[in-house]
Image (cartoon, helix red, strand yellow):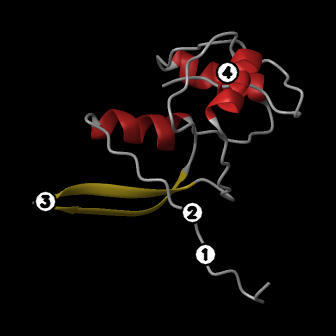
């Protein structure tokens, strides 16, 4: 294993049709810190700090199992975005108050995490 990892950052790029609403949700509702913002005649981009990143690979059967445990039915597509927070109940309440669809109440899982809210 090398002293320095070959990959230093995982960056998830989300293309949002309603850029302003997405920025408001991730920056102002979830509280992700703005690290940079750039605009030109070609469009806008904002980079938000989301803490440490990991890449979790799963097969379709396990993805279906995750949905069953966390939500009770199949809801996720090929990409699932998850944020680790200190208080899942309080953190779920903020986006819900801002109009996010709560697809299941916070539910402890066998792997010691709590389910998601969909924006």
Q: Would you say 104 lies left or right of 43 here?
A: right
Q: Position of residue 69 (x, y in %)?
A: 77, 18
Q: Alpha-carbon neighbours of circle 3 within 10 Å: few (<14), some, or many (≥20)? A: few
In the rendered view, would you say 97 is above or below 91?
above
Task: Name the residue carrying label 3.
Answer: 42
Q: What residue does disc 1 label? A: 7
Q: Which residue is mark 2?
A: 10
- Mark 4 and mark 3 lie on one chain; the one further toward the N terminus is 3
Image quarter (top left, top right, bottom left or bottom right) of the N terminus:
bottom right
Measuring 89% from the left and 33% from the top, which residue is drawn there? 112
Sequence-wise first label, 4 or 2: 2
Distance in Å between CA atoms under marks 3 and 2: 24 Å
- Distance (Cα) linking label 4 and label 2: 24 Å
Q: In the rendering, which numbered label is found on residue 67? A: 4
Is residue 8 toward the left or the right of residue 20 in the image?
Answer: right
State yes or no: discs 1 and 2 in contact (Cβ < 8 Å). yes
Tell me the residue at 57%/36% (across/down): 80
Q: Mark 1 and mark 2: span between their CA atoms?
A: 8 Å
Dot 4: element: helix
């Amino acid at each position: 294993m090398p002293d320095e990892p070959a990959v230093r950052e995982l960056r998830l790029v989300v293309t949002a049709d309603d850029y302003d609403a997405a920025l408001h949700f991730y920056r102002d509702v979830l509280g992700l810190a703005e690290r940079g913002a750039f605009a030109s005649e070609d469009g806008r981009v904002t980079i938000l700090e989301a803490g440490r990143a990991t890449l979790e690979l799963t097969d379709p059967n396990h993805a279906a199992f995750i949905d069953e445990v966390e939500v009770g039915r199949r809801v996720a597509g090929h990409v699932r975005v998850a944020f680790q927070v200190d208080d899942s109940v309080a953190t779920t309440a903020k986006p819900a108050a801002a109009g996010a669809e709560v697809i299941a109440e916070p539910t402890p899982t066998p792997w010691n995490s709590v389910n998601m809210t969909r924006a």
